[in-house]
Image (cartoon, rainbow, N blue to C red):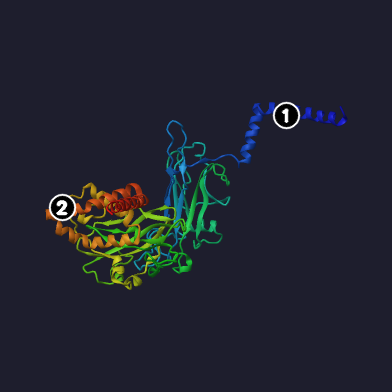
Amino acid sequence: MNFNSIYFESHLRRIRFLWQKLDQWLWQGAGKATVLLALIFLMGGVAEATINPQTVEVINASAWSRPAPQATTPGTGVGGGQAGDFMIYGGIMGPACAPTVSGGTCSNCVGDNMPCNANRITPETLLTIRFRSDNASVITPTSKLFFVIDNRQVSPGPGTDTTFNLNGDITITIRWGDLCGAITSGDTGCNTAVSNKSIQFGISTTNDTTLDEAMTVSLSILGTASADPSSGYPAYQNVTLCPPGVSGVDHQGYCWLEIERGDEKVYINQEASTGELAPLDSKFSALRVFYASKTDGSSSISSVVSSASNYKDFGFTINSDAQTLNDNKISGLTNGTYYYFMFANVDVAGNVFYFSNPTQLDALTPASVRESFIAKPEEVSGALEGKECFIATAAYGTPMAPQLDILRAFRDQFLKTNAVGRWLVKKYYIYGPKWAQKIKKREAARATVRAALSPVVSMAQWLILYGLKSFILISLAGFVVGFLIIKRVIRDHD
């Protein structure tokens, strides 16, 4: 054995000896504690207790939302946490306004079709957060409440609890102006937009920047006092560029609607609506439709309806790069009365902007395009809460006939998903009620219509069950087979 081999073996024995000692020490109590403390230190210090978001309420914000609790998986104990972030929004859309209640939000929506917010924050608005704690170790006579922003303690404002009880309501308050100034240096007037800023609030027993029980929230300040298009919150949509079929235009928010009449209600034709929402721009949260009545249908739209009129907000669901309204009707209207409509977009902070331009709506031509924003509800024979199948209802004598369900599904899945189909549906809603009135009291006419509808219903059912491609393939196969049979017959008779 040479010298190098002896030297190597000597060091190897030393390494084994040290490793055995280290292994024994790690499994002793002191070793375990030391390693645990080191791991905690490396992970960022002693873990703080977390405030339960389900006990938290927010006052004097433009909007807020708590995360939904996650269900616990039965039999596993897994779950029970929170899904998503706790969100607080401050809206600063439009000109400054004065709150009617000291420390509250204010409304600058005055019906002038300009960007606004019915719960606009001001620098003096007192953001108030209430929560509860069942942690006896943090509820002490010396405990303090404060915010932590960028690792800096931010003192709360008036109305903050100085003493609080275990399992009782705990209140922490701060001026929005102080909060804005702490997030964006010097911006105590809350004039700068902020997106998803993480801040903490909670209880400290030592009154330093360490919160012993805390909660992290995501705060956004959205909007601008300017209605200039470059601000990202313009007043109006250019509706001349919005109708379906206009290509090459990148719309933001809902840009075009078509209103269809029903029985004491109207419907928004979602397939004829245009616009781009999240994920292109996640600030949009609702479509606001304003409406007002008039005895005639020939008045200018701008003279009848405005942002001071009644309205309904429609939430929507984002699927891939498209959006679907969660509801599409306005009920409680009067049959035989004309209703005029305009719309705006609403963001997650309650800012209202991107109005349909009333002047442009008045100038829309031809009249059929302008009538997309005017509707006259009428009583319909055999109407359902969904869209009406006027003629089919009259032919089958009941709106509950299963054939009507097939025809409605065919309309929604195949006709309303393309321009030609939407045109056919629109014409049907114009002339269908008149034709239905003519046949509903004539049994011979109803029987004829039922017979004519039978192959249509069969075709519609096939399309719904198996899709358009299979229908085309079967049709082509039938055509080929039929052609071959006819060719064979002709050849046999030559």
Residue 103 in view of the camera: no
Indicate left or right for 169 with 399 as reference. right
**Residue linked to disc 2:** 447
**Mark 1 belongs to which amino acid?**
Trp
Q: Quadrant of the C terminus?
A: bottom left
Q: Residue at x 50, y 41 (%)?
A: 50
Q: Position of residue 489 (x, y in %)?
A: 28, 51
Q: Out of 244 and 35, give the one closest to the viewer.
A: 244
Q: Position of residue 175 (x, y in %)?
A: 48, 56
**Residue linked to disc 1:** 19
Q: Position of residue 152 (x, y in %)?
A: 58, 51
**Mark 2 belongs to which amino acid?**
Ala
Residue 180 in view of the camera: yes
Q: Residue at x 23, y 49 (%)?
A: 403
Q: Out of 240 and 59, give the one closest to the viewer.
A: 240
Q: Residues within 10 Å of mark 1 (few under 14, many from 20)?
A: few
Q: Residues within 10 Å of mark 2 (few under 14, many from 20)?
A: some
